[in-house]
Amino acid sequence: MKIKDIIVEEPVVPSIKQTKFQRGTPNDERARINKIAGKSYRKFNPVSGIDFLGKGVQAYAVSKKDKPHEVKKIVFEGGHPTKDPYFKFLKIAIKNQDSIFMPKVYSIKIFKYAKGPSDSVLHSYSYHVEMERLVGYTALNWGQWSHLFRTYLGTPINKIDDIDSKAAAATYFAEILNDLINVGSHPREVKISNELMPVLKKLARIKNVYHDLHLENMMYRITPYGVQPVIADPFYYS
């Protein structure tokens, strides 16, 4: 897709349960998502054709059963498109869809909440992003982690101290990338892939954001040629 294809609609907010739009505020949406995220609610009130994948502080993700390779990420506390850190990242991803380190984005819709100040920097917008379905760090086996370290960090994973779990591997990997975006340096034992460095430099040029790349903000693409790291959400408000 291209940036000109992004659809802006207002003043509505979508509802998973009813698959139609409803008015509200970010707090209304947060309460509703907390409710449907509960196991007991999902057990007795299944949403037809939709799998609830999980939620974070400002977003949640769902997948349609008839599109198992796609996911919809819904940011329910988004800021104005000119200031929102996640939208700034989406614009980079759209312009670099040929990069294996960017998620494949299929569509973006921006919704403005019916209530609340229209010029508010925080929490006045909702972003609905359809993209490829990736996996988190827990889905990778140790062989795949070894491949990631050899291919993209240029070092065997067993040469790094204190990496004794998937979480430790994912944390180290993400922190190396975040340090490169922040200060342009990395530990002596690491040699960053030539493919990866140009992407990190593009991210480093974005202003007025806090670089927030950690183990939960990295995703991974499993391919016949090996697992690939994908930067999913590297920025936060500065």
Image (spheres, rainbow, N blue to C red):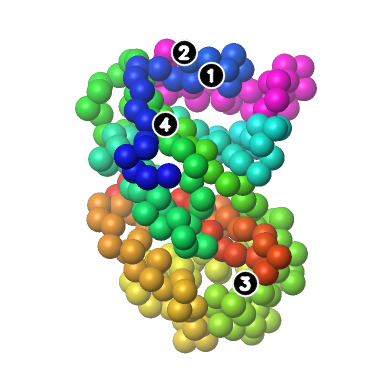
Mark 4 lies on residue: 109
Mark 1 lies on residue: 15
Mark 2 lies on residue: 22
- Label 2 and label 4: CA atoms lie apart by 15 Å
Whether residue 75 is visible here, answered yes or no, is no
Q: Which of marks 2 and 4 is nearer the N terminus?
A: 2
Q: Residue at x 40, y 17 (%)?
A: 12
Q: Residue at x 72, y 16 (%)?
A: 45
- Label 2 and label 1: CA atoms lie apart by 6 Å
User: Could you say whether the residue bearing mark 2 is in a helix, strand or loop?
Assistant: strand
Q: Which of marks 2 and 1 is nearer the N terminus?
A: 1
Decide: is 10 above or below 220.
above
In the rendered structure, find residue 203 and report the number of the disc placed on it: none
At label 4, the amino acid type is Lys
The answer to the question of whether label 4 and label 1 lie on touching residues, with beta carbons closer than 8 A, is no
Q: Where is residue 143 in the image (x, y as percent from the top left)?
A: 74, 72
Dot 4 crowding, Cα within 10 Å, few <14, some 14–19, many 20+: some
Mark 3 lies on residue: 148
Q: Which of marks 2 and 3 is nearer the N terminus?
A: 2
Quarter of the image for residue 228 reads bottom right
Dot 2 crowding, Cα within 10 Å, few <14, some 14–19, many 20+: some
